[in-house]
Image: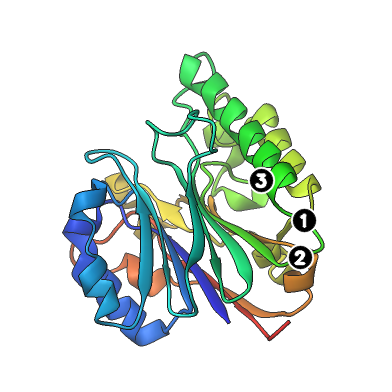
Amino acid sequence: MRFATWNVNSLTARLPRVEAWLEEVQPDVLCLQETKQADAAFPHEAFAAMGYESAHHGEGRWNGVAVVSRVGLERVTRGFGDGHDDAGARLVAADCGGVRVHSVYVPNGRSLDSEHYAVKLAWLGGLRDLLAATCDPSQPVVVCGDFNVAPDDRDVWDPAAFEGMTHVSTPEREALESLCGWGLVDVFRRLHVEPGVYSWWDYRGGSFHRGHGMRIDLVLVTESLAVATTAAEIDREARKGPRPSDHAPVYVDVTRF
C-alpha cells in the first residue's frame, strides 16, 4: 500500500494538480492539509470519479484536512472527539484497508512568546492522548501531515537561521518525540539518514531553487508498518510548475502486513 500526505495550501486552487498527481503516483491513501474549504465545498465527486472515497473536516477559509482512500474508508472521526479541535479543523481519521489513518495539520505556533505556541504544544499533547485512548501501537496506525516541526537539525537548511524561532525549538521537538514515544516511527528518516531533504520551501526569496527548506511534513507509522516499508520519498517535482503549493507531497510504500 502507498500512503501519502500533502499540504496543498488550498484545494480550490490546486485540485487539478492533485488530480494529476493521483493519476501519476497512484497512492492508495492520500492525506490532505490546508484544504481551506468548508465541508460543503469539498469535491467528493471529483475524487469518486478517480475511484477514491473521501472524508473531510473543514470550516472554510483556513485549515481543513482530508483522508482520500481507494482501499476503503470507515469509522471516520473528526477532531479529538471532545470539542477541543472542532473549530480548528486540524484532524480527521479513518480506517483505510485495515490501517487507522490520521491526517493532521499541527498549529504553526507563530513565535515562542505567542499564546499560539502554547496551543501548539498542547495540541501535540492532545494528539498523543488521542492515540493512547483510541489506538494500539501493536496495530497498523499511520499519523501523517504537516507537523510544523522539523524533527532535528538535519531537517532545516540552516539551523542558525532558525535560532529562537518556532518549528525547531526544544519543547516542540520534545513534544514530537513524546508523540513518537507512544509507538510511532518517522519512517522517512529511518530510510534516509542524510541531511538536506526538505518538504517545504518559502515562496519568498527563491527558497526552493536555493535549497532553503525544511522537512516538516511527516509520515509516522507504527512498527508493524515501519518494518514493512520499502520506500519513502518526497516528490520535489510536485513543488515545481505554475502556482504550486509551498509543500511537496511525501509518500511511503508498505508491503502487505
Point out the frontmost of discs 3 and 1.
1
Q: What residue type is labelled 1?
A: Asp
Is 48 on the left or on the right of 152, as rendered?
left
Q: Residues within 10 Å of mark 2 (few under 14, many from 20)?
A: some
Q: Where is residue 58 in the image (x, y as percent from the top left)?
A: 32, 45
Residue annotated with mark 3: 153
Residue 33 in view, yes or no = no
Q: Mark number for residue 90?
A: none
Residue 210 in view, yes or no = yes
- Look at 35% across and 86% down and name the residue there: 24
Residue annotated with mark 1: 136
Q: Where is residue 55 in the image (x, y as percent from the top left)?
A: 38, 60
Q: Where is residue 254 in the image (x, y as percent from the top left)?
A: 65, 80
Q: What residue type is labelled 2?
A: Gln
- Look at 72% across and 43% down and name the residue there: 133
Is 22 on the left or on the right of 20, as rendered?
right
Answer above or below: position of 198 versus 1: above
Q: How many labels does the image show?
A: 3
Quadrant of the frame with the N terminus: bottom right
Labelled pair 3, 1 in contact (Cβ < 8 Å): no
Q: Residues within 10 Å of mark 1 (few under 14, many from 20)?
A: some
Q: Distance between the residues labelled 3 and 1?
A: 30 Å
Q: Distance between the residues labelled 1 and 2?
A: 5 Å
Residue annotated with mark 2: 139
Q: Which amino acid does label 3 sit on?
A: Asp
Of 211 and 39, nearer the camera is: 39
Quadrant of the frame with the C terminus: bottom right
Q: Earlier in the sequence, mark 3 or mark 1?
A: 1
